[in-house]
Image (cartoon, helix red, strand yellow):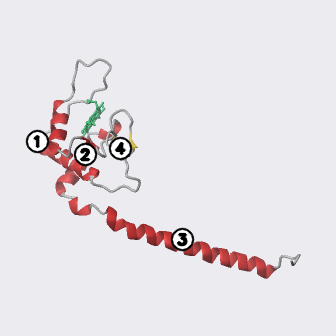
Amino acid sequence: MRETFTKSMARNIYYGGAAFFFLIFLALTFDTVSGLSKTDNSQNLTGQVAEGKRLWEKNDCIGCHTLIGEGAYFAPELGNVFTRFGGSTEAIKAFIKSRPKNGIPNRRSMPQFNFSDEELEAIAQFLKYVDGITTARDWPPNKQG
Ligand code: HEC
């Protein structure tokens, strides 16, 4: 074995390593991009969904709830509430309309927002849309939240 580490050996490691990791980088980029079409949900992105998102932001739902893991931990995750409520936008609307449920001690309660029927429909459509997003790790991990 040679005892010396020459300049050209160092150069080869430098260029070889750079080329090797650049190839890995390209392969991972290709893998990510080729998976994007599977997660594409944009054909369901209607004006109503956009309106629902606007109302979601305006009323600070995220101040209490999480949506696909992001947000506050005061109230249930809503990224899969459409599935949890049996795939029914009617059930979501009925729930939002019926709050708050007073008289249950120590229960966290959701406020009443007095939404119009159109606003309720838009919010329900937004939550349905979010439920349809294919997340990388199938988040949320279970139906409960
Ligand atoms: C002040 C905190 C707070 C805000 C703001 C809030 N919520 Fe809630 N929400 C709750 C709590 C607490 C619950 C669960 C308790 C209950 O059943 O009332 C809940 C439950 C829900 C549920 C049913 C979830 C389930 O799995 O049972 C839906 C749907 C929902 N909220 C939608 C919304 C939407 C849409 C907004 C924004 C317009 C919103 N929430 C804003 C506190 C909040």
- Quarter for ligand 1? top left
Vertical comparison of 27 with 58: above or below: below
Q: CA distance from mark 4 to mark 2?
A: 10 Å
Q: Hey, what amino acid is under mark 1?
A: Asp
Distance from Cα at disc 1 to Cα at disc 2: 21 Å
The kind of residue tagged 3 is: Phe
- The crowding category of the residue bearing disc 1, from other C-alpha atoms within 10 Å (few below 14, some 14 to 19, many at least 20), is few
Task: Determine the CA span between mark 3 and mark 1.
Answer: 50 Å
First of labels 4, 3 by sequence position: 3
Give the foreground label among 3 and 2. Answer: 2
Judging by the rendered image, the residue that carries numbered circle 1 is 117
Q: CA distance from mark 4 to mark 3?
A: 33 Å
Comes first in the chain, label 3 or label 1: 3
Give the camera-side residue of 16 and 48.
16
Crowding at label 3, few (<14), some or many (≥20) Cα neighbours within 10 Å? few
Tell me which label, 4 or 2, sits earlier in the chain: 2
User: Which amino acid does the dot numbered 2 rest on?
Assistant: Thr
